[in-house]
Amino acid sequence: MQHSVDCLVRVLESYRGRDKVIRTLCYGSQLVGGILSRKAVTDASSHNLGKSLMLFSTQLSQCRMVLRLFDDLSMLAYSTSYGFGAKEKDGMVRWISVLTNVADQLYYPCEHVAWAADAQLVRVKSDRWWLISTVLWGTSLLLGILRSLRVLKLLKKELRKRDKDGIKCHCQIHGQMQAELLSILGCMTDLSNAIHWMPQGFLWAGRFPPWLVGLMGTISSLVGLIKMKETVISDGCCSK
């Protein structure tokens, strides 16, 4: 019990870990709140609780958005350090990663402008900037799926090569493959929400009820938490 509490404290002390926890609570509250809000006719108390959870989810979402105002420099530092991916062995993975970094880098200032417009700090219409930021987010997610699929293909080749050479330790490769599969799941659930927030008429835009948005977001958030945990575990996997 104490070990679990200590792990949670360490996660909450880091910015990325805290963001993942807040994100999970945000979408989890929307999921439960959306379900309870549907009981308006039969159960007034459940409806009120659902409404409170939805408001709580909105506040957590606003909290994350404000914190992202300070992410530009860290994203720029990452993009600069990655550059054109000279260390990547596969050209397709390299260029997909570069394009992903570009989409992510452009996403932040666009979201900042949209946020500032909603807060009436700048005199522009926020709708256009929200659309641009959503398109950039969706593009980044789609590129992330393509990158993971490519990495999975390369890992399968590496696994077959090791089998042929008689190398027994596959722990690291299997761990990497599981991580890529989790990334695909997380990106796909987030992409479904990104499409939902596009203008109506585009695929299933605007058709998700609040609980389904919460479900998709909760799944992707849990994937992020699992990957954080698996990264720590996999560090010593093949050393035993």
Image (spheres, rainbow, N blue to C red):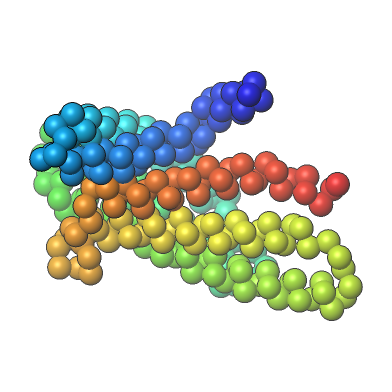
Quadrant in the picture for the N terminus: top right
Q: Is residue 214 visible?
A: yes
Residue 6 percent coordinates (x, y): 62, 23
Q: Residue furthest top?
A: 2
Q: Residue furthest front?
A: 42
Residue 136 rendering spot, x and y as whole percentages: 33, 58
Residue at left offset 16%, top offset 35%: 43
Q: How many marks?
A: 0
- The residue at the point 61 percent across, 42 percent down is 229
What residue lies at 83% left-to-right and 61% top-to-bottom?
Answer: 169
Is residue 198 toward the left or the right of residue 66 in the image?
left
What's the residue at 15%, 50% (across, down)? 127
183, 102: nearer the viewer: 183
Residue 113 seen anywhere in this rendered image of the structure: no
Instruction: Pick whichever, 164 or 77, lies toward us.
Output: 164
In this view, 108 is above or below 6? below
Vertical order, 21 against 147 (above or below): above
Along the horizontal axis of the image, is 169 left or right of 5? right
Q: Position of residue 51 (x, y in %)?
A: 19, 33
Would you place residue 240 above or below residue 83 in this image? above
Which of the 4 quarters of the picture holds residue 152?
bottom right
Give the image quarter of residue 90.
Answer: bottom right
Residue 122 pos. (x, y %)? 15, 37
Residue lying furthest bottom: 164
